[in-house]
Amino acid sequence: MVCCAIDMSKKSIEKKSQNGMEILKQKRERLISRFLKGEIPDFLIQHARILDGYFQNCFETSRVGLQIDIVKNPYAIIAIGGYGREEQCIHSDVDLLFLFKKNIPDKAEELIREIVYPMWDINLEVGYAIRSMSKCLSLAEKDFDVLTPLLDARFVCGHSLLYTKLMEKMRQKIIAKRSHRIIKWLVEKNRKRHVYFGDSTYLLEPNLKEGQGGLRDYHTMLWVAHIKFGLKQLKNFESDDFLSRDEYQTLTHALAFVWNVRNRLHALTGRKCDQLCFEDQIKLANRLQYKKRNGQQPVESFLGELHGKMEFIKQLLLIFLHEMRYAKKGRRLGKRVPTTRFQGLEVRGKMLNFSSPEVVRQTPDLLIYIFEESARLELPLSIEARRRVKFFLYLVDDEFRNSDAAIRSFERVLTTPTPTFNVLNEMLSTVFLGAFIPEFKGIANRIQYDEYHVYPVDRHLLRTVQTLKGFDSSGDKDIPSLCRDIYKELKDRKLLLWATLLHDIGKGKPGKNHSLKGAKITRALFTRRGFQPNEVDTISFLIQEHLLLMKAATRRDINDEETALFCAKKIKDVNSLKMLYLLTVADAISTGPKAWTGWSSVLLRDLCLKVMRILEKGELASQEAVEQVEKKKKKIFRSAKQLQISGEFKELFNVMSPRYLLYTPANEILEHIQLYKSLDGADFVWNIAKISDANTRRVNICAKDRPGLFSKIAGNFTLNNFDILSTQVYTWHNHIALDIFEVKAPLDETFETDKWVRAEKSLSAALAGRLDLASALGKKMFSFRSIAPRTSGKPNKVVVDNTSSSFFTIIEVFTYDFPGLLFCIADTIFRCRLDIRIAKIATKVDQAVDVFYVRDFDGQPVDSPDQENRIIGAIHEVLPVF
């Protein structure tokens, strides 16, 4: 009878356990469903409490629990980490501590199997630790990674006194004795995390938990406050005067927004996911019901708001750490406390403060003078000073903005070299910048949805100013030496820095051509501020033309004299060219890694020097070019004699174009001549070489010229899975084509030689007519063209330009890149009975821009609107469709 009773009790407990799991599953599903409908504002807490209920039920009904002597060795189930903080997102881990008073009993693992394992069956990720009191304290003392989640510990069920004792002993034995060391460890860990997640990948696709301004920033602030002051909840920050009411409310709203996005991302992906990838951004914007407004797509409005909230969280953490004296920012002061130059400002605790609110009311100019002193002394504003700046912004009216004192003070901030301390960031985060320059409000947290612009527009402008000022002292190898030389020569940098700060201000207005809109905005702005007409003209010109040099360098043949002439006519004088070049480089570097490459750097530098030569000498310096070519010929001839291959060289020079002779290095010309001499009766010969970038191969192809040659070569590379990076096309006057391609090396170099052998055979077959590349590539091209872009679907665009060149028609194709794009376009151009003479592969934001200089088979440019329309229509037919 006793055995039967025990068996019945066991079955009863198991049934209750199963019922408990089913109840948990149903409650979660109902709660999540209601949350996604917008009915549960406190979802995180309710979700945590549903889990609490499950564990409490398990504790009461546990079969294994009956077999553990809880009188002699009581235990408690404690929530830790995010679950302990009651921040339980949909697919967040459920972190638990099973804490025993004494040694861990043999039945502990069986207890886990009973309570935790069933949760895995309903796709809950549960992390748990089983520890005795002494072991838990010992580990926490040695390893702060163990200590940190315990800072968020919350009693769920079991022996509550055990939890209380753990908290008391942890504070007495660990926190009280080692608080400074723990906080330093937390701050350093935070710094490393910020560095890691500051990479452009995480700025384009932010990590909601670990990224800059993510939830971990808030947690760090919470942990530091817990260790230093015993605070455990966010509301304590306001009640204990660490945050003003406005800051507390703004932080609460920011956290709620990030948590909402994180939960909806979990629901969208069906798993724990913290990185907001491109493919999910549009979907989330739609689910959150963002609408198109002010010329912005819904996803741009969504990301703009998200970046704004995360930026606030990040800035609040940094300010908090400054107040706690744990931030490393600004210069070392030593024992001597610096003094300010303005009565009403003072330095306290390595931070700038107003001496009282009254001095700000009496002297409103202190609102800008405090930033001037911040730049001069490289000291941040205290949290109280920042609050007062925000409170007194109503004093920044038109009279303040247009006053000579305020303008000159702002210019001193703008021009002061501060390589590691950007005061403009402080101006932006306190909203002073938007008050002083109201036009800035239109670009606050404005996002451009592409893979090219890493930062919101306002942050990008501030970074560009910082990058430009860094030209004065930067040893960064990515910055051209020409930039440093020109920047050091500039005597008055003020106008250039104004233009740099405002070069994208036109993006705050809906519509296209932000450069022109920005020029109009700044012309009105600086006229109103009392600037001289010539100063207004300079700033307005730099803003209107800030894309000119980059467009010309990457989308036009810079070896064509007409390209440099066109730029020279627009720019007009050397000083304007120098400033425009500096702005262009700083803009590209600050946009993101896809905007600034070694290739674009060289093109931009070479174009700048060509335009400078025209502006300085008033001519194309053609006599100088002739002399350069003659020197090059002599050098090549001497080298050829040493190699005993000098025969026929003089005749070959006569068939080479001046453009080829002028811009191709002597050693490469010699290499090309040797390649030509090996051609004999073959359709083509080539050589393949590794260049400085180990992942790139340069392929020199010498072939008998014929219409469609370029498209066949491009198609052959696609057929053999070589990704084309850049091209150069030259035609000698003896019907020899010299095409130079740079392609990505195969991922696996083991069989690279075999790949090149196959590629050579297939090109031979294509040129001989034995291989139809269009048919061979048909299925592959269809699959590539059907792949949608990761970011916004901007429309394809084809432009036929008959005005920029006297000898060629220029075709520009704006589209989304895919393997084989170059072949598709080049083959279509050939079928339109046009011959490609120059080809350039460029980038415009997140689109590819392929540019072709073409002539018809008779050597003439396109000469009729009907033909232009046919070309445009034919190219559109082969571009990607979404």
Image (cartoon, rainbow, N blue to C red):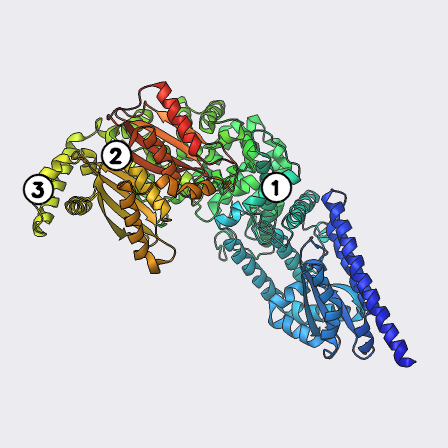
* Rendering coords of residue 531 (x, y %): 44, 25
How far is the residue under mark 2 from the one under mark 1?
45 Å
Q: Residue at x 57, y 37 (%)?
A: 300
Q: Amino acid at mark 2?
A: Asn
**Disc nearest the viewer among 1 and 3:** 3
Tell me the element at label 3: loop
Question: Which sits earlier in the primary sequence, circle 2 or circle 1?
Answer: 1
How far is the residue under mark 3 from the one under mark 2?
27 Å
Question: Which sits earlier in the primary sequence, circle 3 or circle 2?
Answer: 2
* Rendering coords of residue 36 (x, y %): 72, 44
Q: Quadrant of the N terminus?
A: bottom right
Q: Which residue is mark 2?
A: 559
Query: Which is nearer the eye, 241 or 792?
Result: 792
Side of 566 relative to 595 (left or right): left
Looking at the image, can residue 593 be seen?
yes
Query: Which is nearer the eye, 308 or 716?
Result: 716
**Image height check: is 599 above or below 800?**
below
In the image, farthest residue toward the right: 1
Q: Which residue is mark 1?
A: 283
How far is the residue under mark 1 from the one under mark 3?
66 Å
Q: Amino acid at mark 3?
A: Glu
Q: Which residue is mark 3?
A: 648
Side of 667 relative to 645 (left or right): right
